[in-house]
Image (cartoon, rainbow, N blue to C red):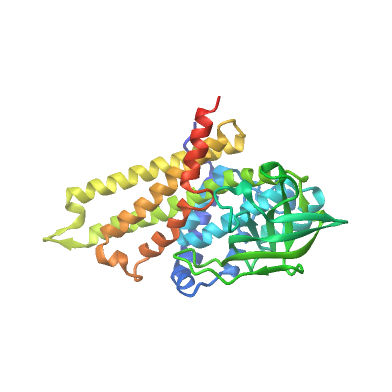
Amino acid sequence: MDFELNEEQRAFKDMAAAFAAEQMAPFADDWDANSHFPVETLKAAAALGFGGIYVRDDVGGSGLSRLDAAMIFEELSRGCTSTAAFISIHNMASWMIDTFGNPDQRARWLPGLCTMETIASYCLTEPGSGSDAAALRTRAVRDGDHYVLNGSKAFISGAGSSDLYVCMVRTGEEGPPGISCIVIEKDTPGLSFGAQERKLGWKSQPTAMVNLQDCRVPAANLIGSEGDGFKIAMAGLDGGRLNIAACSIGAAQACLDLSIRYLGERKQFGRALREFQALQFRIADMATDLEAARLMVHKAATLVDAKTADATRTAAMAKRFATDVGFDVVNQALQLHGGYGYLRDYPIERFLRDVRVHQILEGTNEVMRLIISRDLLSD
């Protein structure tokens, strides 16, 4: 166990921090207020290697590890949590193609995905299947050299704006064995989108339904073999959970830093707030919980890279703990700022709105507990 960053890790961590401070944080409030999807900023992030962080380098990826990615997403989230989370989703979809796609698919799609000239969405959740992902109903029926898709996907980040949709569909029997993974390209006849959702947070990324009505997709777009979809989806989510956990940590660290500064500036009862022991203890607990969450995410990232038997369980633990801690720390930071924390003049209320959904997506934290307990109690 070496807790020191190597020279390369320090370099890209610092690069991500500088990008977040210069290219994201100054504009995050405007993106949030106007529900603006900052595509040019995404491309600028990709130019630094953040479009294909753990995609192999033969197709333009950075070839970094899950631990490296966790450090990068923590820094990016300090600038704009919503935008960092979208970059995470794009990376997850790109990794699925890189890991499970054939050479032609990798060569066809990944160079554009790594530059984010091509943007990807991940389509698993449906109106009738959220936590019970294996119950999805969207069906793909083979018709010659195409599949004909019918169904809907819900809460899809990037819907209507993305170029590729990595979609889980049912090609066979009920349950996990009947699920396959297929890539749908924009402008495919039969592909349409619902109205943009009106959300509490994550407003710098579009979210809508993806509707498939007699949508004909080339069979050559099938990732892996028929029946591999659920395995692909779950493997992708191990990494996606770590990224979202890291985004929670980044947002919480930003709010903790703001709180420490505020406690030094704000005076009540003739003293700076930082002189009150109750508030000192609160800051100590916030920092301690945040460091524990960070260490748990870094350990889980290492295990996911190593493909250990307990990697999925540990990733679920890290996601559950870090997203709960992240929201709690942000919420406490808002409380420390009093009425000012509730105003849009300060970024804390935006961080609060953005991190809340992290306890829901990539598997709810209740489902994380289910994954953990099943693994611990299995024979």
Q: Quadrant of residue 162?
A: bottom right
Q: Position of residue 359 (x, y in %)?
A: 45, 51
Say whether residue 298 is visible: no
Q: Residue at x 82, y 52 (%)?
A: 104
Q: Position of residue 255 (x, y in %)?
A: 36, 57
Q: Is residue 140 above or below residue 285?
A: below
Quarter of the image for the C terminus: give it: top right
The foreground one among 331 and 22 is 331
The foreground one among 225 and 131 is 131
Q: Residue at x 49, y 49 (%)?
A: 364
| Left or right: 344, with 219 as reference point | left
Q: Position of residue 237 (x, y in %)?
A: 59, 46
How many numbered marks have been drawn onto this rendered protein structure?
0
Q: Residue at x 60, y 58 (%)?
A: 48
Q: Position of residue 144 (x, y in %)?
A: 88, 56
Q: Residue at x 22, y 51 (%)?
A: 279
The foreground one among 313 and 73 is 313
